[in-house]
Image (tube, rainbow, N blue to C red):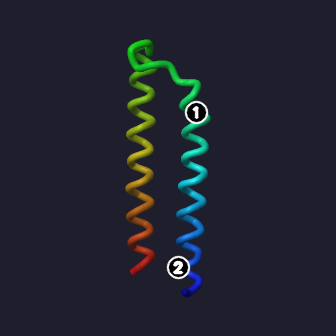
Amino acid sequence: MDGYAIGLAVGLGAGIAIGISIGISIGKKQKPWSELSPREKQLRIGLVALGVVLVVAGLVVFLLRAT
């Protein structure tokens, strides 16, 4: 294995582990959707959309760098 493959495997594993631990710690404090105010619902939808955009941007950068 070359350094790129090792770095990819370590980075992917670390990212998944960190994401799961952050998700679990934040998820315990969340209110159910039905109890959120309209402003909180709008904010949560915006944050999810921002996360999706960042993931797609990361994939594009990764794919452009890998070629």
The vertical placement of 36 against 23, above or below, is above
The residue closer to the viewer here, 51 or 30, is 30
The residue closer to the viewer here, 18 or 59, is 18
Q: Please tell me which residue is depicted at 54% across the width and 80% down the height of the picture.
A: 4
Crowd class of label 2 (few under 14; some 14 to 19; many from 20; radius 10 Å): few
Q: Amino acid at mark 1?
A: Ile
Name the residue carrying label 1: 26
The vertical placement of 30 against 64, above or below, is above
Q: Return the x and y of residue 41 as percentages of the image width and height.
A: 40, 22
Q: Return the x and y of residue 52 as percentages of the image width and height.
A: 39, 47
- Asked whether the beta carbons under mark 2 and mark 1 sit within 8 Å of each other, the answer is no
Would you say 33 lies left or right of 29 here?
A: left
Question: For the residue labelled by badge 2, is the local secondary structure a helix, a strand or a loop?
Answer: helix
Question: For the residue labelled by badge 1, is the local secondary structure a helix, a strand or a loop?
Answer: helix
Crowd class of label 1 (few under 14; some 14 to 19; many from 20; radius 10 Å): few
Q: Please tell me which residue is depicted at 59% across the width and 68% down the height of the picture.
A: 10
Q: Please tell me which residue is depicted at 57% across the width and 77% down the height of the picture.
A: 6
Q: Amino acid at mark 2?
A: Ala
Marked residue nearer the N-terminal end (2 or 1): 2
Q: Please tell me which residue is depicted at 53% across the width and 24% down the height of the picture.
A: 30
Rendered-image quadrant of the C terminus: bottom left
Name the residue carrying label 2: 5
- Tally of numbered tags: 2
Q: Return the x and y of residue 33 as percentages of the image width and height.
A: 40, 20
Rendered-image quadrant of the N terminus: bottom right
Alpha carbons under labels 2 and 1: distance apart: 31 Å
Residue sitting farthest toward the bottom: 2
